[in-house]
């Protein structure tokens, strides 16, 4: 009887053990902290754009030139502080990343992540093709751009705090960008002259600091 009771207890213990459900703890969901802010002196006026103030937010887009599969397609990445309710905006661009569009429609993370630390002190480049570009839209919807041919000796650009973060919406390269440069735009009134004369206006952006991100 003793042996039978002992065996019965062991069997009962096995049943209890087999009924215990182990809690499955899901892996943490990755999140990206995507705050953005711009401040700088634009044409002698201190200007500031802050995320979620007056509708301003950082948006990211890229300009791609696609070649046939096997060729060198390129992508220039832009970050822009803009608001749907405000006319003024500022964007910075950096390029180009070369990639094979036959393999992927966008540069893969393996190219995207190291590109920005490797180009943290870029030269100015029109359309950001081989370096850095600034694009500004003023209160009259007039567009101004930096120029690689500018002879302004104080033109500088520097990226710091570069880090890649990812979440369910994508991969992001966060940065702090400081820059000083002249901005240029064709005077629209000069084009109305007879004959038209392309007169270029300019102004200076100084002590600019843009904290934002590029999205892959």
Image (spheres, helix red, strand yellow):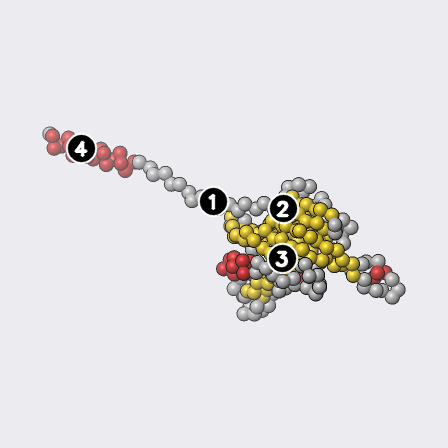
Q: Residue at x 63, y 62 (%)?
A: 123
Q: Nearer the viewer, mark 3 or mark 4?
A: 3
Tag 1, which secondary structure?
Answer: loop
The image's mark for residue 29 is: 1
Q: Residue at x 63, y 50 (%)?
A: 210
* Drawn side of residue 82 relative to residue 31, left or right: right
The image quarter containing residue 21 is: top left
Secondary structure, mark 2, is: strand
Which of marks 4 and 2 precedes in the sequence?
Answer: 4
- Crowd band around label 4 with a 10 angstrom C-alpha radius: few (<14), some (14–19), many (20+): few
- The residue lying furthest to the front in this view is 153
Q: Nearer the viewer, mark 1 or mark 4?
A: 1
Q: Which mark is residue 197?
A: none
Residue placed furthest toward the right:
194
Q: Position of residue 100 (x, y in %)?
A: 54, 66
Q: Quadrant of residue 18?
A: top left
Q: Which residue is mark 4?
A: 8
The numbered mark, 2 or 3, whose residue comes first in the sequence reads 2
Disc 2 packing (10 Å; few <14; some 14–19; many ≥20): some
Q: Nearer the viewer, residue 204 or 187?
A: 204
User: How far is mark 2 from mark 4, CA to CA?
Assistant: 71 Å
Give how far apart the Cα atoms at labels 3 and 4 are. 79 Å
């Amino acid at each position: 009887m003793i042996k039978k009771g002992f065996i019965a207890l062991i069997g009962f213990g096995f049943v209890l053990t087999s009924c215990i459900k182990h809690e499955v703890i899901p892996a943490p969901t990755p999140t990206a902290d995507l705050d953005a802010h711009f401040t700088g002196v634009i044409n002698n006026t201190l200007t500031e754009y802050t995320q979620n103030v007056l509708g301003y937010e950082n948006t990211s887009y890229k300009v791609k030139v696609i070649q046939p599969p096997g060729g060198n397609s390129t992508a220039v990445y832009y970050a822009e502080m803009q608001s749907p309710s405000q006319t003024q905006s500022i964007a910075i661009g950096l390029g180009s990343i070369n990639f094979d569009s036959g393999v992927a429609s966008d540069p893969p993370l393996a190219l995207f992540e190291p590109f920005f630390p490797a180009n943290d002190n870029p030269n100015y480049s029109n359309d950001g093709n081989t370096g850095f570009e600034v694009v500004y839209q003023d209160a009259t919807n007039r567009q101004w751009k930096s120029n690689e041919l500018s002879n302004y000796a104080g033109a500088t650009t520097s990226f710091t705090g570069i880090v890649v973060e990812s979440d369910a919406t994508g991969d992001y390269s966060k940065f702090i960008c400081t820059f000083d440069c002249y901005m240029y735009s064709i005077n629209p009134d000069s084009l109305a002259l007879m004959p038209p004369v392309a007169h270029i206006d300019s102004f200076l952006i100084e002590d600019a600091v843009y904290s934002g991100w590029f999205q892959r």
